[in-house]
């Protein structure tokens, strides 16, 4: 949105719920639907009708939108129910893993049908090729209806922010950046770090519902003096830049934007070879540092390998690695969708 307004375009961001999580450029118009949790059954349909009315009022105020993009499941569901035409539905997660993996029987069938209905005959954007293939394989999305546009990275901004003070200056460390949720698999990361027996500390940037269980795991492994719980940082880039490695241990990703951000700072990355994103991002410079999912020993081996290669100057990360994710390139791909 910030990139678009800098280019002279009018941008309206319609937030489904009232919470504003990210600060945007002052030129971006922010509107809120104010999702209401009705106690009656058709709450999604009622909110969808409210959304349709809200969009109509916005177009009366600002003119017809040349590009409408719906992001994340709740927005996509409401847009589909409201039958808003000429909308691109942007999928940021591996839906088969996030929605179907632990479901069985009728529950799995109903969830799959709901997603099929939501995405049927729609214009769809996927933030990685892995997500595109997941949609084709598991959700009966018609071939050719999905376009991949990667998540963008504002390389210049990230590098500027990385020059701010680093609270962990002066120590050698690995870093993990991500919410403390099950799919990020901090347990596997901690086991791998323990097995690696490194001089490095491990800095965990992020917060989330599993923070207490992660703290307990750290104590159980005897790592209390080596693992640093940094919490959620407004600016994590100085910490990422100074790390010897950024490590991702997820069971699945939609894209894995922290990998592109680390590479933009020329920080080597090690990741699980999960669905979806890491393999696409890490090729070719760090493709050797992909480990099997849910394999602490395999991840430990890749961490040690990457550190050895780093010490021997055998890792080369240049700007060509991240240029394909640059905000200018990705922004142009979005603008090419305008009608």
Image (tube, rainbow, N blue to C red):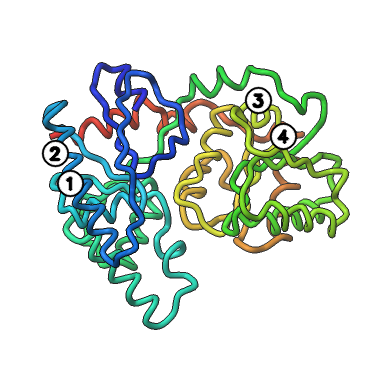
Location of residue 230 by image quarter: top right
Mark 2 nearby-residue class (10 Å; few <14, some 14–19, many ≥20): few
Question: Element at badge 2?
Answer: helix
Residue ID for mark 3: 238
| Residue 63 place in picture, x, y as percent | 12, 28
Whole-number angstrom distance, CA of label 4 to CA of label 3: 12 Å
Residue ID for mark 1: 52
Of callouts 4 and 3, which one flags the residue occurring earlier in the amino acid sequence? 3
Whole-number angstrom distance, CA of label 1 to CA of label 2: 6 Å
Front residue of 55 and 124: 55
Of callouts 3 and 1, which one flags the residue occurring earlier in the amino acid sequence? 1
Residue 266 visible in the current orientation? no
Question: Residue placed farthest to the front in the image?
Answer: 39
Mark 3 nearby-residue class (10 Å; few <14, some 14–19, many ≥20): many
Residue ID for mark 4: 244
| Circle nearer the viewer, 2 or 4 | 2
Of callouts 3 and 2, which one flags the residue occurring earlier in the amino acid sequence? 2
Of callouts 1 and 4, which one flags the residue occurring earlier in the amino acid sequence? 1
Front residue of 103 and 294: 103
| Circle nearer the viewer, 1 or 4 | 1
Residue ID for mark 2: 56
Residue 122 visible in the current orientation? yes
91 relative position to 56: left or right = right
């Amino acid at each position: 949105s910030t990139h678009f307004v800098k280019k002279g375009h009018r941008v309206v961001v319609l937030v489904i719920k009232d919470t504003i999580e990210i600060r945007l450029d002052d030129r971006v118009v922010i509107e809120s639907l104010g999702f209401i949790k009705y106690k009656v059954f058709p709450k999604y349909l009622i909110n969808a009708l409210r959304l349709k009315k809200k969009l109509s009022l916005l177009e009366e105020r600002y003119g017809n939108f040349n590009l409408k993009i719906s992001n994340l499941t709740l927005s996509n569901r409401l847009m589909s129910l409201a039958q808003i035409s000429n909308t691109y539905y942007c999928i940021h997660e591996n839906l088969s893993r996030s929605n179907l993996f632990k479901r069985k029987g009728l529950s799995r069938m109903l969830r799959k049908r709901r997603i099929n209905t939501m995405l049927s005959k729609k214009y769809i954007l996927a933030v990685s090729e892995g997500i595109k293939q997941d949609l084709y394989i598991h959700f009966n999305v018609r071939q050719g209806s999905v376009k991949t546009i990667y998540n963008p990275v504002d390389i210049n901004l990230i590098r500027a922010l990385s020059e701010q003070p680093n609270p962990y200056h002066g120590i050698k460390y690995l870093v993990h950046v991500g919410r403390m949720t099950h799919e990020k698999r901090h347990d596997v990361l901690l086991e791998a770090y323990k097995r690696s027996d490194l001089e490095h500390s491990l800095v965990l940037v992020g917060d989330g519902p599993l923070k207490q269980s992660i703290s307990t795991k750290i104590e159980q492994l005897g790592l209390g003096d080596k693992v640093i719980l940094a919490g959620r940082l407004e600016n994590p880039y100085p910490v990422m830049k100074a790390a010897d490695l950024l490590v991702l241990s997820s069971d699945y990703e939609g894209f894995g934007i922290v990998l592109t951000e680390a590479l933009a700072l020329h920080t080597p990355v090690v990741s699980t070879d999960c669905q979806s994103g890491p393999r696409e991002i890490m090729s070719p410079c760090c493709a050797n540092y992909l480990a099997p999912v849910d394999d602490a020993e395999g991840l430990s081996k890749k961490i040690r390998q990457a550190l050895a290669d780093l010490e021997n100057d055998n890792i080369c990360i240049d700007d060509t690695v991240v240029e394909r994710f640059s905000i200018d390139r990705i922004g142009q791909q979005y603008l090419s969708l305008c009608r």
